[in-house]
Amino acid sequence: MDFLERLEPGARARLVEESRTIHLSRGEVLIHRGEPGGDVYLLETGTLEAIDSRSEPAIILARIHAGDLVGEMAFLSEATRTADVRAAEDCVCRWWSRSQLQRLVEEDPSLGRSLFRTLAELVVERSRQISRLATEGALGRTSTPRPTPAAARHLADPLREVLMASEPDFRRDPADATRRVRHALDRFRGEFFDAWQGRSAPRRQALGAALGRELHPYLIRSHLAEYALDRASGASEDPLAVEHLHRDEAGGDGELGDLLDRWLLDLPTAVGLRRRSAQTLTACRDLLASGHRVVAVNGSRWPHLSDLVPLLLERGCRLTLIENDRASLRAAMRRLDPLPADRVRPVLLPVADALLRRHTPDVGVQEMVIVWGLLDYLPDRLAIRLLRAVATGLAPGGHALVTALAPSDDAPIFDHLLGWPTVRRSARHLVDLATRAGLDCAAPPAEGGVALVVHGCRGGDPPAATPPRPPQGATD
């Protein structure tokens, strides 16, 4: 079924009436890479080719056949063209300019709803096709792709319907559109968690992967989702996503992208990640004494690392920085630039690899060890090894600050839709791991929040009985 056949009859008749016809000769270019997008074309006869003309000869990326639409992604996202499109043979196309389509949508809201719903359906189908081709492989490998679980469609369809209808609604009544989209997102969050909770791990993965494909065209309009899903292969998290999450300034593609981003940034996990960063800094202010030696593990990912510098200078402390890779080590050292060279010692150590080999570096005895975020990605057996190494390296009465994440109903969204999987532990479970590793712990952090900062020590005077206090005005 081509683009026009999907439209409601009234919308189809109006768009046909408003369209203009263009003729292309073989080899003629319809779209140039890098030019502003927005105009939409419907190929009626002939064949077009999407090409990368930066190489010689040009690389054919895709073939476009009669009935296919061209330019709809750039119309929706207002992005520049990403490829050249030329005629492989003589072609006839219908053409609508961006300004023309915007005028029609404003004049006729029902046409706008039909248009945006149809465009969204086409984008979803294209996304599914790309996923299927990726699954089958480009080097001759063949496999039967798993169909989208019915449960995923059942969850995605109501939300997708609201998101599809929201574009014209944002122009007509932004407040009402915002309310309806937020309501649909909150309902989806609850239903996704209920469906996810009752499944085995493989079925959770299948459901999450299917939902990710179904909702990808919408999620990617949020900056947080864009950064998280665009991270380097093998990376547990994307630095841009972490920075955006902690900056807490929503942004995205259009009103819908802004709203989706704000919704994601307001989820309990995002709030908890921001809160535990501030909690850790507050604990450092409470516990660091003059001349203390401090180790920060994975500190490059700690948003408040730079705020530690004045405290270290004021109290004459020395810092050993342990990072997994050179890029992280360089990034962390730049943030510690005000510290004199004799006050900071960089150590390169892939921590997870060292734990698997049961090897930990000798960095000397320390009065404080900060373990930032690593337990988000380590199973219990490796977490205990890490905590034992922390306990062994502490001076009597020394302090350990260990961060983690507690379970929450938005975990499936981060794990599967944002591709940001984490290991969740209750406060009591985390304290139990620390105790088994040889750390004396204060009372468990208050249950009910996502942010966990456990304060433990090795022998000597026990730590205070209360957990690090949250910054003023922080909420979970």
Image (cartoon, rainbow, N blue to C red):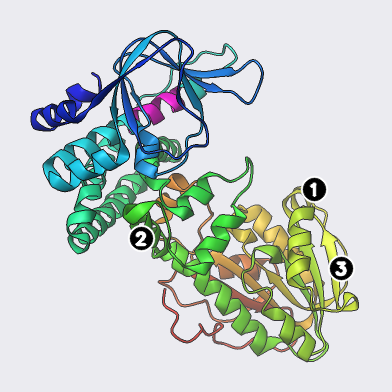
Q: Few, some or many C-alpha atoms within 10 Å of disc 2 (few <14, some 14-19, many ≥20)?
A: some
Q: Quadrant of the N terminus?
A: top left
Q: Position of residue 9 (x, y in %)?
A: 9, 28
Q: Position of residue 143 (x, y in %)?
A: 49, 15
Name the N-terminal-most of marks 3 and 2. 2
Picture residue at 36% right of the left edge, 53% below the top: 254
Residue bearing mark 2: 263
Q: Few, some or many C-alpha atoms within 10 Å of disc 3 (few <14, some 14-19, many ≥20)?
A: few
Identity of the amino acid at label 1? Arg
Identity of the amino acid at label 2? Trp
**From this viewpoint, is residue 424 visible?**
yes
- When asked about the image quadrant of residue 53, the answer is top right
Q: Which numbered dot is residue 35?
A: none
Name the N-terminal-most of marks 1 and 2. 2
Give, as a single range, the part of the protein colored magenta: 124-132
Q: Which numbered dot is residue 363?
A: 3
Q: Which numbered dot is residue 357?
A: 1
Q: Using the numbered discs, state the Cα–Cα distance from disc 3 to disc 2 in whole angstroms.
A: 42 Å
Q: How many marks?
A: 3
Mark 1, mark 2: which one is toward the viewer? 2
Horizontal side of residue 440 vs 429, given as left or right = right
Tell me: residue 315, above or below residue 392: below
Q: Using the numbered discs, state the Cα–Cα distance from disc 1 to disc 2 in whole angstroms.
A: 41 Å
Horizontal side of residue 25 vs 318, given as left or right = left
Q: In terms of secondary structure, what is the magenta stretch mainly?
A: helix
